[in-house]
Image (cartoon, rainbow, N blue to C red):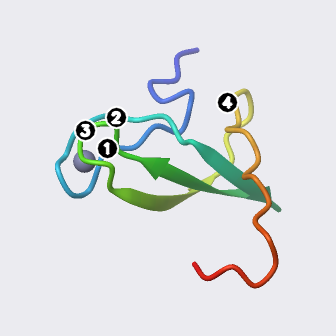
Amino acid sequence: MSDHNPHYADCCPRCLAGPTRPASGIATGGSLTAAYRCPACRHVWSCSWALVPGRQLPPAPQIRAEGEAA
Ligand SMILES: [Zn+2]
């Protein structure tokens, strides 16, 4: 069995660099919301995936202080 995207990698939507592994992600139910930062242009984006068994999940995001503006 082969999985051509075992880390939920995604390409930068701005400069098309990549694919880049997610910096963090939140898995809920059967889906993963992953956050990315482009190593080339530093663009930040997120992507939702259906969870695939056997894939490596990204680390959980760091908790920010309450009230911090996004
Ligand atoms: Zn980029």
- Say if mark 4 contacts mark 2, CB within 8 Å: no
The response on whether ligand 1 sits within 8 Å of label 3 is yes
* Residue where numbered disc 3 is placed: 40
Using the image as rendered, state which of residue 63 and residue 20 is in the foreground: 63
Q: CA distance from mark 4 to mark 1?
A: 18 Å
- The amino acid beneath tag 2 is Pro
* Mark 1, secondary structure of its residue: loop
Q: CA distance from mark 3 to mark 4?
A: 25 Å
| Lateral position of residue 66 relative to residue 16, left or right | right
Q: CA distance from mark 1 to mark 3?
A: 11 Å
Would you identify the image quadrant in which residue 68 lies?
Answer: bottom right
* Residue where numbered disc 2 is placed: 19
Looking at the figure, which quarter contains the C terminus? bottom right
Q: How many C-alpha atoms fall within 10 Å of the one at disc 2: few (<14), some, or many (≥20)?
A: some
* Residue where numbered disc 1 is placed: 11
- Say if mark 2 contacts mark 1, CB within 8 Å: yes
Which of marks 2 and 4 precedes in the sequence? 2
Which of marks 2 and 3 precedes in the sequence? 2
Residue 44's disc number: none
- The amino acid beneath tag 4 is Arg
- The amino acid beneath tag 1 is Cys
Where in the figure is residue 15, as x and y percent of width and height? 17, 49
Looking at the figure, which quarter contains the N terminus? top right
Q: CA distance from mark 4 to mark 2?
A: 16 Å
Which of marks 1 and 4 precedes in the sequence? 1
Q: How many C-alpha atoms fall within 10 Å of the one at disc 1: few (<14), some, or many (≥20)?
A: some
* Residue where numbered disc 4 is placed: 55
* Mark 4, secondary structure of its residue: loop
Residue shown at 35% from the left, 44% from the top: 38
